[in-house]
Amino acid sequence: MIPGPEEVYGVLDSRFPFDSAYDWDNSGWQIAATRPIQRCLVALDPSVTAVEKAIEWQAQLLLTHHPLFLPHLSSIHPQSSTGAITKVLLASDTGLLASHSCADRHIDGISGALADAIGLECHQVLATDAQGTLYKLVTFVPDDYLEPVRTALAAAGAGVIGNYEECSFTLAGIGTYRPQKGARPMQGEIGQLEMVDEHRLEMRVPEAAVGGVLKALQRYHPYDEVAFDLFRTFAQGDQLGIGVLGTLPQAKALNDVIDHIKKALGGVHMKVTGPEEGTIEVVAVAAGSAGDFVPIAAGRGAQLFLGGDLKYHKMLDYSGSIVCVDPGHRATEQPGVERLADVLRHAAVQNNWELEVETFLEDPAFGRFV
Ligand SMILES: [Zn+2]
């Protein structure tokens, strides 16, 4: 099956909900896709080269981290680069979708991908700015439909506990109902009491995924009236925020850690400030423009902070206490491009979609030294 634009959008929305983006941001459709999506190119920027690649590859969708229209669009000048890109995308009927600060604010998003790229363990949000509410969904599913329903709920974002996906609990039992006039029972007749072998299925649902999970439940559950309860729990939901704090699998000499980071990021040049020797174990990362997070990283005990666009005064102020490593904005966000692509690849396998996903990574060393 070839997914439609809304199905592809729904997958990203359940992983990094678009409405969790910051108010100043413009995540979501930049140019809505209109065709079924067989090919999706994923890139950091909606640059001229990325758009050309998408069209050349005959992709129906270009998914980027950075939006084309930021700040929000008020007018388009055809001669501007934004105008030219818009024109080309519209003429080729190529959709453009951006997963920007919504992917930044989730621990397994753009910064999580950077943390994974350098092998950090025990991830925590570096700078928390919101705490999501956690819900528990309980529903009752006839036996033959248990697996499709459970899989669909998991694909929509239910059942994640820490580093585990598809967490659920099921219990077999008997469900009863007596269909009334107007009902369309899957099994049984109007006016007759029916007893059905069902499973009680329970899964955790983070606040941001509630809408998508309930939609998936209605779609995959076979009954015309789906019985379910959604409980608000007192457990803490996902923390939202910027950056990741973690630890290396073992403490290492500073120079070895720097070499390791450089290699993990494709050998890009990096600006390094702070202590010149020592042992590093606790590391903070923040992909993209991370200049404001140096004090937070230092305050939380990180011995090294890896981020893009670090600011001179912040690096100077903390040069006695924390090693700062800045490989540039693009280099820190490129692992996140692979992460976005993997979200779609994973969904394609789970949903049996005919969807090819490729990444387009531009030279991580944006600009040149002369
Ligand atoms: Zn960025």
Image (spheres, rainbow, N blue to C red):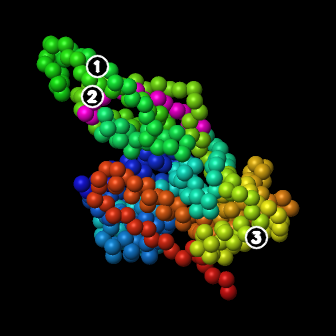
Q: Is residue 44 magenta?
A: no
Q: Quadrant of the N terminus?
A: bottom left
Q: Badge 3: few (under 14), some or many (20 or more) residues near its Cα, within 10 Å?
A: some
Compared across the picture, whether 80 is left or right of 91 comes to right
User: Which residue in the structure is indicated by mark 1?
Assistant: 175
Decide if ligand 1 comes within 8 Å of the CB at mark 3: no
- Amino acid type, callout 2: Pro
Asked which secondary structure carries label 1, the reply is strand
Residues under numbered marks 1 and 2 in contact, where contact means CB atoms less than 8 Å apart: yes
Q: Earlier in the sequence, mark 2 or mark 3?
A: 2
Residue 122 % position (x, y): 64, 49
Alpha-carbon span between mark 2 and mark 3:
59 Å
Residue 142 on the magenta span: yes
Neighbour tally class for label 2: few under 14, some 14-19, many 20 plus, Cα within 10 Å: many
Main secondary structure type of the part rendered in magenta = strand
* Mark 3 and mark 1 residues within 8 Å of each other at the beta carbon: no
- Check the image and report above or below for 115 versus 329: above
> Circle 3 — which element?
helix
Question: In the rendered structure, which segment of residues is drawn in magenta?
Answer: 131-145
Three-letter residue code for mark 1: Gly
Name the residue carrying label 3.
255
Residue most extreme to the bottom: 370
Is 10 in front, or is 51? 10
**Label placed on residue 142:** 2
